[in-house]
Each structure stands twice: as C-alpha cells, then as structure tokens.
Image (spheres, rainbow, N blue to C red):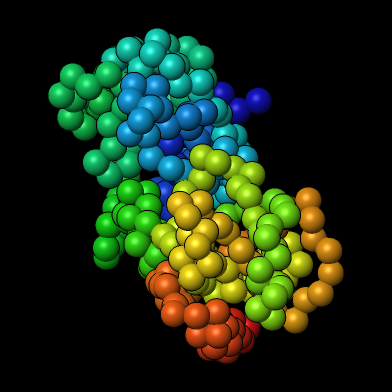
Amino acid sequence: MNSKSVCSIGFFDGVHRGHRFLIQQVLDEAAKRSARSLLITFDRHPRSVFAPDSAPALITSGSEKMALLRATGVDDVFVLPFDRSMAALTAREFMDKVLKQQLGVTTLVIGYDHHFGRPQGESFDDYVCFGRELGIEVVRAQELEGEHVSSSTIRKALLQGDVERAAQLLGRQYEWTGRVVHGHAIGRQLGFPTANLESVEPQKLLPARGVYAVRVKDCGINAMLNIGHRPTLDNGNDVSIEAHLLGFEGNLYDKELTIAFAARLRQEQKFGSEDALKEQLWLDKERAEAILKAEG
C-alpha cells in the first residue's frame, strides 16, 4: 500500500465549486508525489456541538455529501466524529494525533483562509512550522478566481429563493428530497392535483416560500412546486410543500421524490378568490413549462 498521502480538511457542505477546485489541487498534488489522495470531513457541523440553536441548515445531507465527494475521484474520504474532545485539540495536536498518527498524512493542502483545531491565532506559517516538526509538508491551495464561493453564500441565496444563483455557485441545481404524504386534495379541486411532500432529511435547507419550476429527478418529470402557507386557502402557519407534476397521472403515495430546483417563478401571495388563484396557477404552469423546456 502507498505510504504517502495528500489530504485536505473541511466540512465540505454542498461540495460546491470552491470545494471542487480545492479537491482538484489535492488530486494534482497526489499525482505529483505518486501518493494517495484523501479528504477528511466531519460527521456534523461544528456549530451543532457548541451552539445547536445557531447551527445552519445543511445544503447536503451526510449521504449526499459523501456521494459527491467520492465522485471527485479521490482515493479515500475519512469521516471524523466531531465532538467536544475533537474540538479541544489545537491545530498542532490535530496534525500530530489525527493526521500523522491516525491517518499517516504526508502532505496537507490547506484551503484559502481555512483554519482547523482549537483557535490559538495560528497563521499559515504556523501550520508550515508544525508540519516541519511532524514530517508533514503543508501546501497552500490557490483560491478559485472570480467571486468567492462559500457554503454560507449558497445558504443565503436559497433562503432568498434565488435558486438560480445557488445553482451557479454549486455548479449544479440544488436538490431536496421529500416523501409523498396525504394532503387535503384541494389542488385536485382546482384542477392542479399535487403530491404533498414531507422532508426525509429534516436537517436540509428548504428554499424560501414561493412557487418554483423544478424537475423530479427520480422519474425525469417536470413540475412546479409550491412552498408556503397557502394563504388563499387559510392554511394557517403550517408550511406545505406541494408538487404539481406536469402531464403526470398516477399514485405516488409513500414514494420519495428528489426535487431539482430550476427557477423561482414568484413569491408566495394571497389572492382574492380561488378563481384568481386558479388563473395564476395556469400562468405559473406555462412559465414553468417554458423554463424547463429551454433547459432541455
């Protein structure tokens, strides 16, 4: 087995364009050294340990993140359990106990403006010094040119309903998975039968309320999706997630549907009557069909 390994560390939520640019550098450095490539990530967001109430909703679930990381072509992905004892390690202790002793890392690629371990004001030069003492070469990664891409920027875009900007930063459309459950069948009465969805990954971020053009990945069917309180129908404070599958008829109860968000059609709004709502739904359908057709 190759005793050399090149690694990078991060939570990698979203596995966005910035992450993939960093990972490509890990692959390149590994190839130069005839070494194995390794990514180290954590089983939970660090804030969920220290301040659970302020922990962000996730862009990718654990399984989704692992699939995306493995798809980059790295040799190994190692998931560390993040707890208070892990968080208590200084950067040097982490490099010694985890990188060197546990994983045998010989080269560490540090992402732009990235820090790890219990903060003690370390700089990149400090990491280089620790590495020299421990026999780990430390390499500074280049930053992706152009705008800064971060998980927090993507979360902000999704919370504003800007799924197109989120897709540009991710390098793919944002996806969310729900299980079809029984609803009130009101959409059917309006001529727009819907699949009522309940999240199967509660930790994942749900975009802002509104109406979206989406694609159901499982079956390749175009749809429009409503997220909101259904104010015209007096739904109270309950948030409903309903997908109207364009041109589809059939029973979907208990099935899991993965939704890829293409565009936001409009914000949630209250109409004066059900007839006015129905008229708007026809307009939404036409726009959704046009947007998704243009996508191909």
Determine if residue 111 is in view: yes
Q: Is residue 13 above or below residue 161?
A: above
Give whichever of 86, 159 is nearer the camera.
159
Determine if residue 168 is in view: no
Residue furthest to the left in view is: 121
Q: Is residue 51 above or below residue 25?
A: above
Q: Is residue 120 above or below residue 290?
A: above
Q: Quadrant of residue 220?
A: bottom right
- Percent x, y of residue 93: 33, 12
Q: Is residue 169 left or right of residue 41?
A: left
Point out the image quarter for the C terminus: bottom right
Point out the image quarter for the N terminus: top right
Residue at image location 57% in from the left, 38% down from the top: 62
Residue at image location 15% in from the left, 24% down from the top: 121
- Percent x, y of residue 273: 50, 80
Give whichever of 13, 282 is nearer the camera.
282
Residue at image location 24% in from the left, 41% down from the top: 113
Give whichever of 203, 138 is nearer the camera.
203
- Percent x, y of residue 38: 52, 34
Residue at image location 55% in from the left, 57% down from the top: 240
Residue furthest to the right in view is: 250
Total residue callouts: 0
